[in-house]
Amino acid sequence: FFFQAEDGIRDSSVTGVQTCALPIWPHFANDLDNIRVVVPDLTFEDRISVHLGDRELVFYHPGPAHTYGDAAALLAGERILFTGDLFFNRVCPAAHQGTLKGWANAVREMLELEVDTIVPGHGPIAGKAELRKMLRYLEMIQAGARAGYERGWSAKQTADAMDLGDFRRWGDTDERLVDDVERAFLNYREGKE
């Protein structure tokens, strides 16, 4: 059983790898060549509740963030949040389709939830302190990207100039940071940031 937010995204799931991912990350082409694309069984616009016995699992869509169809799942009674790719813990976030601004807003919304345990899409299980760190990282990328864009720098120049402190040591930063800056630049040109 597979779910995804945003009903309109379901159909694009079939071609998403070819039209969205491969032009940005051609080095994944061989890895994805024989992957069977599975479209979601269930889609929703804002939120949906699934009742499992006496437990309620709430899936919600925070708006475009990491991608257009991001969703998180909340077990409020157990105070557990499953974030999917909305939370990268100790790994450089990868801005695929959405906006850094939308993603930061989604993280702020998750920080308002009454949860103790957060299960990220990448990295170890965590709590709000780690989620706040990722928010700071997103904000630093936003600020650095904006400064580089306004100076007319390339995404690579901008990424290299960013003072990320300890975030520079987060996993996959060397591979993803330039892509994140390029996503921010695209959003600036399209008026989305």
Image (tube, helix red, strand yellow):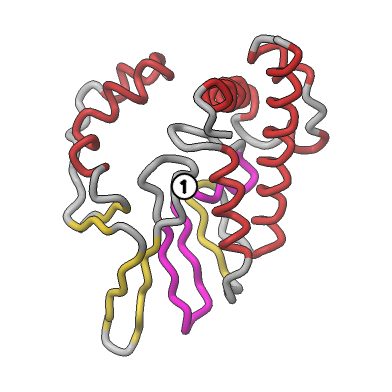
Instruction: Tell me, yes or no, whether the highlighted magenta stretch contains residue 87.
Output: yes
Instruction: Tell me, yes or no, whether the highlighted magenta stretch contains residue 83.
Output: yes
Task: Tell me: 13 left or right of 112.
Answer: left
The secondary element bearing badge 1 is classed as strand
Q: Which residues are magenta?
A: 72-91
Which quarter of the figure has residue 141? top right
Q: Which residue is mark 1?
A: 85
Residue under the point 71% across and 61% down: 129
Residue under the point 62% across and 35% down: 171
Residue under the point 57% across and 69% down: 117
Residue under the point 45% across and 44% down: 64
Camera-nearest residue between 35 and 37:
37
Q: Position of residue 70 (x, y in %)?
A: 40, 49
Camera-nearest residue between 82 and 146:
146
Q: Position of residue 40 (x, y in %)?
A: 20, 50
**Residue type, numbered disc 1:** Asp
Up-down: is 103 above or below 110?
above
Task: Tell me: 78 left or right of 169.
Answer: left
